[in-house]
Image: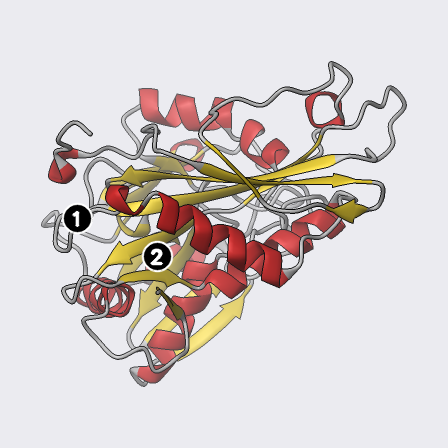
Amino acid sequence: METIDWSSLSFGYMPTDYNVRYTYKNNAWGEMEITDSQTVTMHIASTCLHYGQAAFEGLKAFRGKDGKIRIFRLDENAKRLQSSCRGIMMPELSLEKFKDAVITAVKKNERFVPPYESGASLYIRPVLFGTGEQVGVKPAKEYVFIIFVTPVGPYFKEGFKPTPMVILRQYDRAAPLGTGTFKVGGNYAASLVAGEKAHEMGYSAVLYLDAKEKKYIDECGPANFFGIRGNSYITPKSTSILPSITNKSLMTIAESLGMTVEQRRVPEEELETFDEAGACGTAAVISPIERIDDLDRNKSYVFSKDGKPGVICEKLYNKLRAIQYGDETDTFGWITIVE
């Protein structure tokens, strides 16, 4: 293997040695298959190609100071994939099969797990999609589940530094009571135009408002939003937000630090009252927000004037990372150690 410069890795795909697969046929999941092939062969009428029957997950493995490899919140990712499968009528993969596949994929690609303190991690991508042929709009009868892994650096190239975000009212990511609460490909396809426009304008991401009234904060494209006011951690609740496992973890950590946690509807005007704000997700962990510009209202909500993360964001980030890397005891039962 050529030498990898771990500290300069971007958040992108790098080929690794193996991936793990299961195939669903005749109403049952088959046995695990381990392959070095990086391609998939499927029918031209596969439902994933025509009707978007595809869901995915994202989780990470970290190498600790002790050399052990730790996977963060494996069970929660397995459960969320099951929820996505129910949302678009795909067969659920058992928690046991999911766990076996994740651990096998990490073990088979152990040499790609970045070293401790490199700032990089091993990103684990499970994906499940319909491969059975279907021309009418119906669920497929055959599916494939794959896990591949790739070493990655920070999702936002700035790393743990505040970045500006923008509200673009002319775009929606997901509709209330639609598929927003599921991690399905269509939600991300729907965010591409707005996301690219934001990048062209110099912003790291779009902060979406609710699709129905355009009054309440929804989420930041690929991540959940949270605001800090005094000793309170406040994050939006809606029927179109993907339940972020990182956000769920941060809420638990905030409570353990004696903070008040509020998950509720957050009107845009409340942004003015926050001391700090951030976007959170598996890929980004926490990306502190420098400011949010509402171009339609010619309004800016500023959270960082010196270009540095806020004190609470930093405390939450450091605590979560310490658990992920094994620097602090995992009192929450979030870590799976790869034996």
Pinpoint residue 225: horizontal percent, then vertical percent. Answer: 42, 54
Q: Residue at x 46, y 66 (%)?
A: 248
- The residue labelled by disc 1 is 119
Q: Position of residue 28 (x, y in %)?
A: 79, 48
Identify the residue at image location x=19%, y=39%.
158
Could you tell me which secondary element the residue under label 2 belongs to? Answer: helix
Residue labelled with disc 2: 272
The front one of 211 and 11 is 11
**Secondary-structure class at tag 1:** loop
Left or right: residue 245 versus residue 127 is: left
137 up-or-down from 248: above or below: above
Residue 190 can be seen in this image: yes
Whole-angstrom CA distance, mark 1 to mark 2, is 33 Å
Question: For the residue marked with disc 1, what is the amino acid?
Answer: Gly
Residue 312 quadrant: bottom left
The residue positioned 32% from the left and 85% from the top of the image is: 258
Q: Position of residue 217 (x, y in %)?
A: 50, 51
- Figure quadrant of residue 21: top right
Of residue 94 and residue 239, the one placed in the foreground of this image is 94
Q: Pick whichever of labels 1 and 2 is earlier in the sequence.
A: 1
- Under mark 2, the amino acid is Glu
User: With 267 as the anchor, is 53 left or right in this view?
Assistant: right
